[in-house]
Image: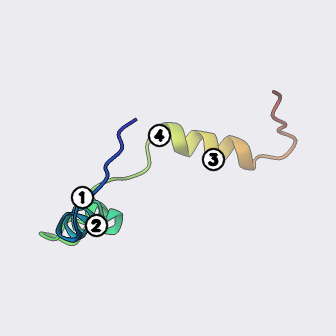
Amino acid sequence: MNLHLPQSLETRAEIQELAMVPRMIVTPQSNRPVMGIVQDTLTAVRKFTKRDVFLER
């Protein structure tokens, strides 16, 4: 795991600008999403929403 600790106010502002998640999802060039849901996620969501499906530990 990485941990970033800003040392000054300028560094804090820079990190907030660079690590802003909403800006990383949409590309400014075409205003379209850069990432999407992977097939595994879609399959898991479908299985979780079916009736009579129980998860065991």
Q: Residue 7 carries which label?
A: 1
Q: Which mark is residue 39?
A: 4
Classed neighbour count for the residue bearing mark 2: other residues with Cα under 10 Å, few (<14), some (14–19), many (≥20): few
Return the residue found at the far left.
29
Position of 18 relative to 35 (above/below): below
Whole-Å distance between the Cαs marked 1 and 3?
Answer: 42 Å
Whole-Å distance between the Cαs marked 2 and 1?
Answer: 13 Å
Q: Is residue 44 left or right of residue 30?
A: right
Viewport quadrant of the N terminus: top left
Report the residue marked by disc 2: 16
In the rendered structure, which disc, 3 or 2, sits on the residue that comes first in sequence? 2
Type of the residue with mark 2: Gln
Classed neighbour count for the residue bearing mark 1: other residues with Cα under 10 Å, few (<14), some (14–19), many (≥20): few
Whole-Å distance between the Cαs marked 1 and 4?
Answer: 41 Å
Return the residue found at the far front.
7
Q: Where is residue 20 in the image (x, y as percent from the top left)?
A: 31, 65
